[in-house]
Image: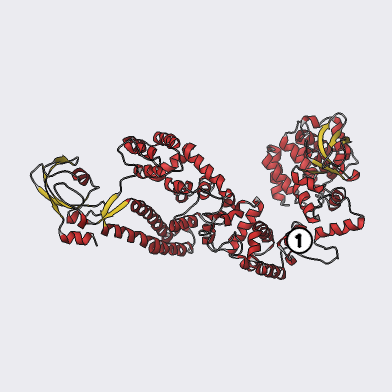
Amino acid sequence: MDSAVFEELLVSALEKPSKKTLDALLAQLATAGNPIPAPVIAQLDELWEAWGNDELDDAQGAFCVGLAALPMADSPVFRKMLIAGVKATLPPYLTRTPVMKALGVRDENMSLAEISARLQRLVALKNGVIIFLPGASRWGTAGTVDNINASLTVNTFGGIGGSAAIPLDVVLKDAVILGTGPELLRLVDANRLISAPEFRTIVQRKALTPVSEAQMQAMAQAGCARKFDPAGFDRYWKSATGSLSNGSSRRSCDGRSLKEMDLLLTGEEAGAARFSDEEAAHFRRFFENLKADTAAREVKLLASIVARITPRATPEQLKEMMIPLLNKALFWPAAPGKVALDRLSVWGELAAKNLENLAAATAVVFPEEYQAECAMRIPLKALNAVCASISEEMLYDFYCEHKTCSADFLLWIWKNRKKRPSEELLELVNVENVSRALSFDDLPKAWGAALRELRGLLLDNVDFQKQLIKAADGDAMMFAAVLQGALFLSPGERQSLMVKLARISPELRDYLENGAGQRILKAGIGVTDTGAPVEQEPNYTSVKSHKRLMAELDDIINVQVPENREALKVARAHGDFRENSEFDAAKERRNFLSRRRGELERELTRIQPISLKSVRVEDSAVIGSEIELQDENGEKEVYQLLGAWDGDPERRFLSYRTRLGKAVLNRKVGSEFSDGSRQYKLIAVRPLSPEIVAELDA
């Protein structure tokens, strides 16, 4: 115990006995020794003197009760405080004199440790919990506590025994109290005997009070193993410690099948020592000999075994042990991003503790890039455990390179936006990714919950909708185009969603009211009653520009992104990010590449390349024609009217998507028009020169 810290906490407790201070003081006293030295106990008299004349609050009561569980000497002064502490922590109906007598708080012959154990049992006694009375070898279900007669109603359990009122003193003396659950019936069913290791596991998992080895044996003898004679029971019970009926000792690493290994691991007591190198080698040989079809058929059991092995192995041992499982275990495929989702379902089926350990093993065995690839695919249930060892930068890097993420991953980002704030990751929660994720159907069961929850956020959560609009960065056309293609929404849901989005974004509202809203509502329901096209009009451009954009996208994906990723790795290796200019530069480059890739991918889905040599030029300004204009001052200008991505001011190449291009497109020779700033007259339309056609069709 740190004497200085103890004295400081004691002073604080005297001035203001808050729960935080008293918990810290109790933690210090727990390290004071066995027994707690008399001088330390004497210092506590200051507390008893300060508290003695007042009614204790919950924090003070909990401190006194907690202190009784420590190895300290009894005294009349502390016993008085303990009585007050018990009254402060128990419900009023349990502080009646008969109940207090059963607790023994006023019995000088009863030790503080015994009082503490009795109090723990009394607190655990809730209506419906399962109890076992060692003295009577009796199983039962707890009923109500009679605080007048100090008794407990015990009802039949699993067909054993009948109802009776048991003195509370008997119950509090040594009863084992277990939580509820259907698996507890297996503890008393002699017709379906469970193994001794499984018996121990269920009891330890469900125990609400400490259970000794002797108590567990008595529970088994009065429960599922009651048909055994003494010698038979002894052989049965020895299997709980890894000893077979013939007396030979077997360790978990000696298991000859997954089921036997699981049984032996269960039999090894909690807190067992780390594996030796020799034991680790045994595990490796077992996994080497494990058949792939067996690993696939019993994948959940295999994952559970790996999870239970992990805390007892060093990282070096774990790597060696698990090498044979790479690509043999379904939860560790060679390429997580390319396998069918149902191969990864076990990540959504394990218990939380096993998930944490399996994720820890994955972090030891595999590089961070592999873990990030898993994160994009596994169910939401496992993501907190898996992502705990992955940096936000790595997750974002992986997305930027592969442009894929699931509804589960998007939902994880959203749920963790405050715990793990990352503007880059939050950018991934955008309307394109959400729409793409929700468009998947027939997903395995483990992924269904996240899909439904993400859909609910899209339709009903204002904060989520604001995030989607923010991520769109004012691009109302793109936002509306994605909604138009979101066929997972019914027309009614589209209309409701557009109304909600329009309330948030004036820009989107204006765009929807100008006709886009009608196109969205009509998407996917056949012939419309309006002349507006159901699909957004494509962007026409030349073959040359289309090839150039495709080449730029290919260069970003296959050259620039991998180069940037390597630059980030090198920059990270330099240490402190706050003064790491190389890291900042690489990060900015990564963000640019991600934005540019997204822009190109969106545009290329809307581009329609055209061959200019097939364009017929008559008396109207069309894409692929040379036009001659005369402005309001009489000056003449000649332009080549070309595709959306063909503009070049120096060569007088005019994109039809510019303000002037939109104004002149499809007008006949002699027409007068305005581009919003100047008045023009179209005085001539001619075919493009053969040289320009050849260049742009190449």
**Which residue is located at x 16 percent, y 51 percent?**
617
Task: Say whether residue 88 is left or right of residue 551.
Answer: right
Task: Say whether residue 534 is left or right of residue 258.
Answer: left
The part of the image, by quadrant, that contains residue 491 is: top left
The one of 83 and 591 positioned closer to us in this rendering: 591
Total numbered labels: 1
**Which residue is located at x 73 percent, y 62 percent?**
261
**Dot 1: element:** helix
Query: Would residue 328 be seen by someone viewing this image from the given angle?
Result: yes
Quarter of the image with the C terminus is bottom left
Classify mark 1: residues with Cα within 10 Å, few (<14), some (14-19) or many (20+).
Answer: many
Q: Which residue carries the number 1 mark? A: 264
Query: Would residue 105 be seen by someone viewing this image from the given angle?
Result: no
The one of 694 and 347 positioned closer to us in this rendering: 694
Q: Position of residue 652 (x, y in %)?
A: 17, 54
Q: Position of residue 366 (x, y in %)?
A: 57, 63
The one of 537 and 498 positioned closer to us in this rendering: 537
**Which residue is located at x 38 percent, y 53 percent?**
598
Q: Position of residue 659 (x, y in %)?
A: 22, 44
Task: Say whether residue 536 is left or right of residue 255.
Answer: left
**Residue ranking furthest to the left:** 634
Tell me if residue 210 comes above or below residue 287 in the rendering: above
Amino acid at pointer 1: Leu
